[in-house]
Amino acid sequence: MLLVTLMLSTILVLLVIAISLLLLWAAAFVIRHFPLWLEANAAGLGVSFIDLLTIRLRKLQPDELVDCLKVMRKAGVEVALADLQSHQLAGGNLASLKNAVVAANKAGIKLGYRDIAAIDLAGRDILDAVDSHVNPKVLRCPVPGQPLVNGREPGVAGIAKDGIRLEVKARVTLRTRLDRLVGGAGEATILARVAEGIVAAIGHADSHRRILENPELIVQEILKGGLDSGTCFEILSVDIADIDVMDNVAARLRSQQAEADKRIAQAKAEERRANAVAINQEMLSQTMGMRAKVVAARANLPQAVAAACDGSNLGSPRPIAPLLPANMRFGQCGGRSCIE
């Protein structure tokens, strides 16, 4: 019986200590968060200590959530504290969300809190998107900061039909389309398409003078192409800032082609010369061979003459008549032929 009483006393003491510690912790929590609670209720947010405790248990910052909720409520945006907690737990940026929601509401943009929160969770800079929708941004084409060429920033180069190369610098005014912000192409795509339009416009011109006289041809070519399709921007205007005449590409290409043709002709002429030299050497070799044969034939000539004389066959293709008696060879027949 004594043991049971001792155990009950111990449990009671431990329970009292636990309750005391819990009350002390609750008092410390209330004292610490009382200014925040007072501020929230003074603003009419209806935040209780239980809400603050829930926020702490979720390892969130009550100050940020209460401040964001207060700003949104004062701006006329109806949002619950639980929505802000869910957004922060999902990895959203409360500061950007707050500023974007207030800016969109004041600018009259038909975009609700959930839409803006979804865009923020998708990884887009929602504050910059809303700002560029209200105040359209201006981009330079090509993008500044590229390496200098001959001490100057390069432009978008295109070649007209007459072979003259032009470099164009343009400014593009864009407005963000918030309904296409998720999944739409960005600024890099717009600038690439604008550069493509500039090159196409210059290439369609019969002469570079037409582009210099009427830069609007480039603008018309860009705007009629629907370059903003599939992007999260709307092209409001394209302004040609500068046009530079660079060089005559056609003349340079013709010069290079002529030089190449010259080298080919020289190579063929050298080939023909080499063939002629080879043929000449071959003819000389054959001539020397013929001369050797002539010399060999001349060496046999005395023997042939001697053989002809011995055979009485000198200068006749057939054997002569039998030899006459000696007394009849030298006209001893009275002026008549001795053979007759």
Image (cartoon, rainbow, N blue to C red):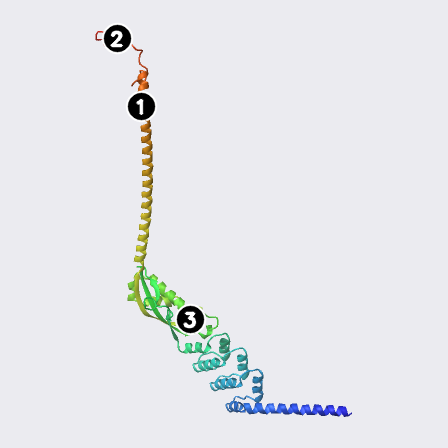
Quarter of the image where one finds residue 191: bottom left
Closer to us: mark 1 or mark 3? 1
- The residue singled out by tag 3 in the image is 187
- The residue singled out by tag 2 in the image is 328
The foreground one among 140 and 151 is 151
Give the amino acid at mark 2.
Met
- Classify 163 as above or below 135: above
Instruction: Indicate the quadrant containing the C terminus: top left, top right, bottom left or bottom right.
Output: top left
Where residue 84 appears, as percent x and y from the top left, is 53, 82
- The residue singled out by tag 1 in the image is 301
Where residue 319 appears, as percent x and y from the top left, is 32, 15
Where disc 2 sits, the SS reads helix
Where disc 3 sits, the SS reads helix
Where residue 200 appears, as percent x and y from the top left, is 36, 63
Give the amino acid at mark 3.
Glu
Give the amino acid at mark 1.
Leu
| Other-residue count near label 1 (Cα within 10 Å), few / some / many at <14 / 14–19 / ≥20 | few
Side of 210 where 9 appears, left or right? right
